[in-house]
Amino acid sequence: MSTKAEFRTHQLKRLQAAADETQAASESLMATLFKTSFWQQAKSIGITVSSPFEVATAPIIAAAHAANKAVFLPRVMPKRQMVFLPDPGHKQLVKSAFGIPEPAYQANLVEPAPDLLIVPGIGFSLADKYRIGFGGGYYDRFLAKYPGHTLTLVPPVMAFPQPDWPVERFDVPIETLILANGDII
């Protein structure tokens, strides 16, 4: 088993090489998502703006708005904290220190717990639903206190039977994984 840093380096190369495959899987992943009770019952969702090698989130954000769901995007804060703020629209997002589009901070608009949180990552274990992200620990810190439902859309390149990375005591598993073949685990 590699270290988390070694896994991330290798996996990011795999993700970039499989970007077209991931985008092709996005449609089936979204179709399955939209049929779930988690999606249908959620009045609010938390979701990131995707990078080119992740499942496309712009159509999910648009579908949420069309369904009159409140959409919240993450913003990183000092001390490796993260908050969710209302989606101000793509043109009003600012780039974080990590180059990720996020809303400008407004303390009075922070949403402590969207009903449904669609969690990003670069790898997901199908056996125990652990994830590995980009390495900041922002999501694990947030998830440790999050009371809502967590869900992830997992294209084939991000699916692992068991974790190929070390799982640590502060890692928080995802409640529901949606796979490109339509399986929900």
Image (spheres, grey):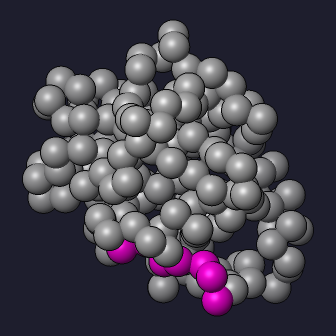
Q: Is residue 47 above or below residue 66?
A: below
- Give the percent coordinates (x, y) of residue 47: 43, 43
Horizontally, residue 135 falls left or right of residue 46, namely right
| Residue numbers of the magenta segment | 169-177
Q: Quadrant of residue 75?
A: top right
Q: Can residue 175 be seen at all in this image of the molecule?
A: yes
Q: Can residue 158 be seen at all in this image of the molecule?
A: no
The C terminus sits in image quarter:
bottom left
Q: Main secondary structure of the magenta part?
A: loop
Q: Is residue 85 above or below residue 58?
A: below
Residue drawn at x 12%, y 58% is 37
The N terminus sits in image quarter:
bottom right
Horizontally, residue 59 falls left or right of residue 101, namely left
Residue drawn at x 70%, y 32% is 96
Q: Is residue 87 above or below residue 119?
A: above
- Give the percent coordinates (x, y) of residue 44: 24, 44
- Give the percent coordinates (x, y) of residue 155: 50, 53
- Give the percent coordinates (x, y) of residue 170: 63, 82
Q: Nearer the viewer, residue 37 or 178?
A: 37
Residue drawn at x 42%, y 59% is 152
Residue drawn at x 36%, y 73% is 175
Horizontally, residue 162 falls left or right of residue 145, namely right
Q: Nearer the viewer, residue 92 or 132?
A: 92
